[in-house]
Image (cartoon, grey):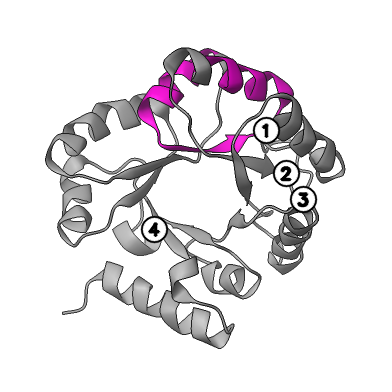
Amino acid sequence: MTSKLDAILQNIEAMARRAKRNTEDITLIAVSKTKSIQDIIPLLNQGHRVFGENKIQEAQDKWPLLRQDYTAIELHLIGPLQSNKVRQAIQTFDVIETVDRPKIARAIARISQEEQKICPCYIQINVGCEDQKAGIDPNQADAFIKLCRDELKLPIVGLMCIPPADQDPKEYFLLLKEIADRNQLAKLSMGMSGDYALAIECGATSVRIGTALFGER
């Protein structure tokens, strides 16, 4: 029987072909938040190595143990980051996708030097300008990207977004791509279980999929 992982990878390949894109340019981030070590191990045994977690403490409870038995894991922080947790985030994660305000950016820059560990970073854009969501306002994105790259020398590799849940995400995916293109950023983390096909069509280089892989939380 084809596993859920295999099925999603086949879907991504088909969607990439339809969009005339190279499948190798699209990464599946398996969102393992709230999932146990026992839930994650089957994916690791199938060779998958890129995972996303929302909470630092939860990641610290699982991934040091998993890293003892599995190599080449790439762990992404995809949840909100508080300034008092930046050091733990840098110690725990390989990629930080939720840089969203100057205070956090400055803390990452300082603590990365202290820890002598450089994590590639994505800037989170609040594409729907929603009060309840993290992310920099799209109108402030260019200036914030400039601050992060030019003044703070952060390794900004791309942008991340979570579109409004009750609207067609296409315009928001295209907005993220527009901001990335004019700032020469190559990576776009966008698209989840319900809309990753559209995200790939709009240029996503990584899709964050939890429910379709692991089932409902």
Q: Position of residue 108 (x, y in %)?
A: 57, 22
The correct choice, above or below, for 67 with respect to 186 in the image is above
Nearer to me, 99 or 126: 99
The residue identified by callout 1 is 100
Quarter location, residue 99: top right
Q: Is mark 2 on a helix, strand or loop?
A: loop
Classify mark 2: residues with Cα within 10 Å, few (<14), some (14-19) or many (20+). Answer: many
The residue identified by callout 4 is 211
Q: Name the quadrant of the N terminus.
A: bottom left
Q: Where is residue 187 in the image (x, y as percent from the top left)?
A: 59, 55
Q: Which residue shows up at 55% across the image and 87% down it?
A: 18
Q: Position of residue 48 (x, y in %)?
A: 27, 58
The residue identified by callout 2 is 126
Identity, as a three-letter code, of the amino acid under mark 4:
Thr
The residue identified by callout 3 is 183
Question: What is the spatial separation of the Cα atoms under label 4 and label 2, in whole angstroms?
Answer: 22 Å
Identity, as a three-letter code, of the amino acid under mark 1:
Asp
Nearer to me, 134 or 76: 76
Question: What is the spatial separation of the Cα atoms under label 4 and label 3, in whole angstroms?
Answer: 32 Å
- Magenta stretch mostly in which secondary structure? helix
Tags 2 and 1 touching, CB below 8 Å: yes
Question: What is the spatial separation of the Cα atoms under label 2 and label 1, in whole angstroms?
Answer: 9 Å
Q: Which residue shows up at 78% across the image and 60% down it?
A: 178
> What span is in magenta?
84-111
